Structures are given as C-alpha cells and as structure tokens.
C-alpha cells in the first residue's frame, strides 16, 4: 500500500509518516510539501490513500481534493487540519 501525506509543514509530514509507519510497517509512505507536488506524485505513481492538509499556500486541500476525485475517483482521501485557536 502506498500512502501519500500532503502538508506544507515538514515537521507535520515527518510526524504523520512516523505514525503511519508505526501502525502499518509494510506500507510505503510518500510525502509532498503541497498540492502541486502531490499532483505530480499522483501522475507518476499509484497512490492507495492520501492524507491531505486542508490549509496550504499554493492550492488548498479542498482544491486538491476536487482534482483528485475528478482524476482518481477511487483513491480515498482523508482531510486533516489544525488551527492555532484552541
């Protein structure tokens, strides 16, 4: 299984990669720093699941979700986000 993690913060991507690999040691994790990079990964590799941040600077996660569902409708996408306001 190949899981794509998309987040503009490197520390968050690395943390999510660690958590995914701890829970699913046989899966391959691919990281992308934004929506544009994620689309390049989708176009070059088979992705089985995507974990996508909602708020990113180039294209936001919702725009990425629309494109993914239009071009790769069978790929599950889990949207993630955090806010500084508690």
Image (cartoon, rainbow, N blue to C red):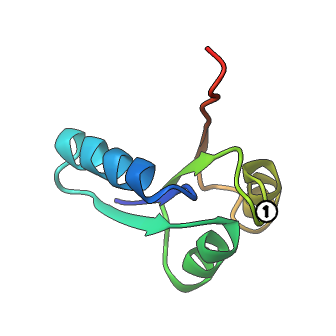
Residue at the limit of the structure toward the bottom, as seen here: 44
Residue 45 location in percent, x, y? 49, 79
Residue 50 location in percent, x, y? 53, 53
Residue 28 location in percent, x, y? 29, 64
- Judged left or right of residue 21, residue 46 is right
Please state which of residues 39 and 57 is positioned toward the viewer in this rendering. Answer: 57
Please state which of residues 50 and 70 is positioned toward the viewer in this rendering. Answer: 50
The image quadrant of residue 85 is top right
Q: How many marks?
A: 1
Q: Residue at x 34, y 62 (%)?
A: 29
In which quadrant will I find the N terminus? bottom left
In which quadrant will I find the C terminus? top right
- Reply above or below: 1 against 78: below
- Judged left or right of residue 56, residue 78 is left
Q: Residue at x 60, y 70 (%)?
A: 38
- Reply above or below: 56 against 38: above
Please state which of residues 20 and 86 is positioned toward the viewer in this rendering. Answer: 86
Residue at the limit of the structure toward the front, as seen here: 85
Q: Residue at x 23, y 49 (%)?
A: 21
User: How dense is the environment of label 1, judged by Cα within 10 Å: few (below 14), some, or many (20 and up)?
Assistant: few
- Reply above or below: 56 against 42: above
Residue 72 location in percent, x, y? 69, 64
Element carrying mark 1: loop
Q: Label 1, on which residue? A: 59
Q: Residue at x 18, y 42 (%)?
A: 22
- Judged left or right of residue 70, residue 27 is left
The image quadrant of residue 54 is top right
Please state which of residues 50 and 53 is positioned toward the viewer in this rendering. Answer: 53
């Amino acid at each position: 299984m190949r899981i794509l993690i998309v987040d503009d913060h490197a520390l968050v991507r690395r943390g999510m990669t660690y958590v995914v690999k701890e829970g699913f040691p046989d899966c391959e994790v691919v990281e992308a720093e934004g929506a544009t990079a994620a689309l390049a990964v989708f176009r070059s590799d088979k992705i089985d699941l995507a974990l996508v941040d909602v708020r990113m600077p180039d294209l936001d996660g919702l725009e990425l979700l629309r494109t993914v569902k239009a071009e790769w409708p069978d790929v599950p996408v889990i949207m993630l986000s955090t806010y500084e306001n508690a």
